Image (tube, rainbow, N blue to C red):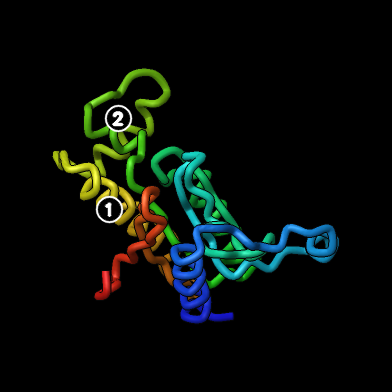
């Protein structure tokens, strides 16, 4: 499957989730048995560790469809890049989506200037990405756009791979893609 087909499946899945508000993905015993022979995800999703953000549900996907990487604030570092490279080069996943979300605690902490303890590693990375932005939604988008750039730079010169970003609204269930003209 190519990146455009993968992105189209995610867009359609997000619209299905938005309309139905329920998850109907296949997590059956038969699916688990089939996947025990190997995985062939069609997209990588980098998203927040927030328990309210469930990529398989948001994109109406089955078990085995997505290679999911979760970190607070969707921050990209060496481990995340290595995981993305693994998916792209070894599993031949043609698409990576960075999915930010509304009401992100990590982005909120960065906007508020919190940098204490180990959490400071995350909030400082987000602050670097958002600069002085104080609007939480704009900051979320800037942070996700920064992660998209990091991934694009890392995969530069490799096999064809598309990277794009989106923001999930946890209240409405709507996914807004960065390149959408429809909103």
Residue at left offset 39%, top offset 41%? 73
Residue at left offset 37%, top offset 33%? 122
Residue at left offset 30%, top offset 65%? 178
The percent coordinates of residue 59 (x first, y second) are 52, 63
Name the quadrant containing residue 183. Answer: bottom left
Q: Is residue 39 left or right of residue 100?
A: right
Q: Within 10 angstroms of label 2, few (less than 14), some, or many (20 or more) residues?
A: some
Q: Within 10 angstroms of label 1, few (less than 14), some, or many (20 or more) residues?
A: many
Which sits in the foreground, 169 or 155?
Answer: 169
In the rendered picture of this protein, how many numbered marks are placed on residues? 2
In the rendered image, the vertical position of residue 60 relative to residue 170, given as above or below: below
The percent coordinates of residue 129 (x first, y second) are 26, 45
The quarter of the image holding the N terminus is bottom right
Q: Is residue 149 left or right of residue 65?
A: left
Residue at left offset 21%, top offset 50%? 138
Which sits in the foreground, 154 or 61?
Answer: 61
**Label 1 or label 2, whichever comes before in sequence order:** 2
The percent coordinates of residue 27 (x first, y second) are 73, 58
- Residue marked by disc 2: 109
Tag 1 secondary structure: helix
Tag 2 secondary structure: helix
The percent coordinates of residue 86 (x first, y second) are 60, 58
- Residue marked by disc 1: 141
């Amino acid at each position: 499957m190519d990146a455009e087909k993968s992105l189209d499946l995610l867009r359609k899945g997000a619209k299905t989730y938005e309309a139905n508000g329920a998850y109907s993905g296949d997590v059956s015993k038969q699916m688990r048995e089939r996947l025990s022979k190997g995985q062939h995800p069609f997209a990588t999703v980098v998203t927040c560790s927030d328990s309210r953000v469930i990529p398989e549900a948001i994109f109406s996907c089955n078990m085995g469809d997505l290679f999911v990487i979760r970190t607070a604030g969707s921050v990209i570092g060496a481990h995340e890049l290595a995981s993305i490279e693994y998916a792209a080069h070894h599993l031949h996943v043609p698409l990576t989506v960075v999915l930010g979300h509304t009401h992100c605690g990590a982005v909120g902490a960065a906007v508020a200037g919190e940098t204490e303890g180990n959490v400071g590693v995350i909030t400082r990375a987000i602050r670097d990405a958002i600069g002085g932005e104080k609007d939480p939604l704009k900051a979320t988008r800037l942070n996700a756009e920064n992660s998209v750039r990091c991934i694009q730079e890392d995969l530069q010169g490799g096999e064809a791979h598309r990277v794009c970003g989106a923001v999930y609204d946890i209240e409405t269930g709507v996914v807004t893609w960065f390149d959408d003209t429809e909103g």
